[in-house]
Amino acid sequence: MSYFQAIVIGLLQGVTELFPISSLGHSVLVPAWLGWDHLVTAQSASESFYLAFVVALHVATAVALLVYFREDWVRIIKAFLHTIRTRRLETPDERMAWLLIVATIPAGITGLALEHSLRTLFAKPLAAGIFLTANGGLLFVGERFRRRAAVRKLIAEHPTVQSEGEVGRRLDTLEFKEAGTIGVAQIGALFAGVSRSGITMVAGLVRGLDHEDAARFSFLLATPIIFAAGFYKLPDLAGHLGDGIRGQALVGSIFAGLAAYASVRFLMRFFESHNLTPFAIYCLAFGAISIIRFA
């Protein structure tokens, strides 16, 4: 892998991990479109230097999320430790801590069990194009469902927040079973082309959250998941799979972290007054032409 390729893929990872357009899908499709066939083949191999490289990019993305939401995480961790002592949930931050724990469990367990099998089976250009198109459809459906009477009724039954004319239930009013449902939705991101942030945002929207809080919960939830997956696989980079690419991994990680930080800053502002529709259109278009190209 060249340093140029490392920079391109690092920037790609930093943006697509947070934009609801699938980082895994783009890490398959973009190299395929650019003719970097050795990287495409390595993506679905059982062991490869490329996977070790991508692990480093994931950790850099998680670091960027942690830095951006550092004040939230300080409050959440303090609140969690307080609940351990008191065995009660008394504040929104204490409830948020346990909502994140509950939502993390389904994807964590399933990822450990199935990530390897699903990646080797579906991390191929045609499959990624199909799943990216499905991701676009999912975002469209989520936006339409958000406007249904059942969701409006759900919002009316809870304390609400309002931003830029959009009303949604407060994030800390989610029930634990709803957090678990959002966590289960994350499992879809194991398929190359399905976005982790997109699918969790849709799950939050259909439970009455506004776009800003749905994005916030999605990014907070992604942080421990990405960290855990990254550190679980990080020994690969230190072993023989990292031979000859550690310098590229470092450079790629720097660009991935910077791109991720810029992306989360942009998206948190964007979702104050916009929705998922532009990303749905992009996924449908890029997915469709990718299907035609690689069929």
Image (cartoon, rainbow, N blue to C red):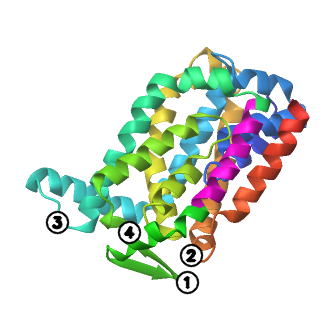
Q: Residues within 10 Å of mark 1 (few under 14, many from 20)?
A: few
From the viewer's perspective, tell me whether residue 278 is left or right of residue 178.
right
State the residue position of label 4.
154
Q: Tell which circle, 2 or 4, labels the residue nearer the N-terminal end.
A: 4
Q: Secondary structure at mark 1?
A: loop
The residue under label 2 is 272
> Can I make out residue 269 in this image?
yes
Q: Magenta stretch mostly in which secondary structure? A: helix
Q: Is residue 129 magenta?
A: yes
User: At which x and y percent is residue 254?
Assistant: 65, 47
The residues colored magenta run 127-142
Q: Position of residue 274 (x, y in %)?
A: 63, 73
Does residue 68 appear to the left or right of 249 in the view shown?
Answer: left
Q: Is residue 16 depicted above or below 251 in this figure?
A: below
- Mark 3 → mark 4, Cα distance in angstroms: 23 Å
Give the number of the disc on residue 90: 3
Q: Amino acid at mark 4?
A: Leu
> The disc labelled 1 sits on which kind of residue?
Glu
Image quadrant in which the N terminus is located: top right
Say if mark 4 contacts mark 1, CB within 8 Å: no
- Secondary structure beneath dot 4 equals helix
In this picture, residue 77 sits left or right of residue 7: left
Tell me the quadrant of the picture where the C terminus can be found: top right
